[in-house]
Amino acid sequence: MGKNDDRHMRYLSETELVSMQNSGLVEIEPHTKSHVKLTRSPLESARMQIEESKHILESIRKKPCITFAPPWGMFDNAIIDLVRSAGFLASVGVHEGTVSAHADPFRLPRNSIDRSTTMMQFKGKVSRAIDGYVALSGACQ
């Protein structure tokens, strides 16, 4: 069993991470070492959070980590430079949408799916329908 965080949510154990990774259904990728807001951290601290999370997960997974997910999707150009220099090939934010051929690999969209997501919403999020919704909701603001 994993330990709990400050929100009383249980962390996954290394065994659980490896089992999930080996299922072929998910990829486990870094998200910082201690879930800090990178844009509010000194750059050296942010660099350590990014690099150490990559190193720790690579030692558990036994293969390279190539995608990074900044906590809360908070990043700026300096953070992207740190992610790139740590050897990642891509990074995801929190804006919904699908990836196009012209997408910046360090500003990729990411669709949130959780237990409250209906099957209809899921179908929309894994199809290009989400792009129309995002465009429409942006036009209404």
Image (cartoon, grey):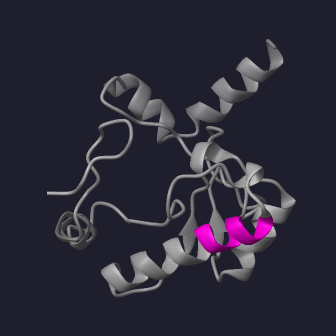
Q: Where 73 sits versus 104, above or below?
A: above
Residue 103 drawn at (x, y percent): 75, 58
Residue 87 image point, x, y percent: 65, 83
Nearer the observer, 41 or 88: 41
Residue at 64 percent of width and 76 percent of height: 89
Image coordinates for residue 92, horizontal then vertical, percent: 62, 55
- Name the residue rendered at 26%, 66% in the picture: 17
* Picture quadrant where residue 106 is located: bottom right
Query: Residue drawn at (69%, 55%), measured in percent from left and top?
Result: 38
Dominant secondary-structure state across the stretch colored magenta = helix
Q: Which residues are magenta?
A: 43-49
Quadrant for residue 24, please give it. bottom left
User: Which residue, as the protein is rendered here, is positioned at the far top?
Assistant: 140
The reply to whether the magenta stretch includes residue 105 is no
Query: Does 48 sit left or right of 61 as displayed?
Result: right
Q: Nearer the viewer, residue 56 or 100?
A: 56
Q: Is residue 38 left or right of residue 67?
A: right
Q: Residue furthest right?
A: 77
Q: How many marks?
A: 0
Residue 4 in the figure: left or right of residue 32? left
Tell me if residue 48 is in the magenta stretch.
Answer: yes
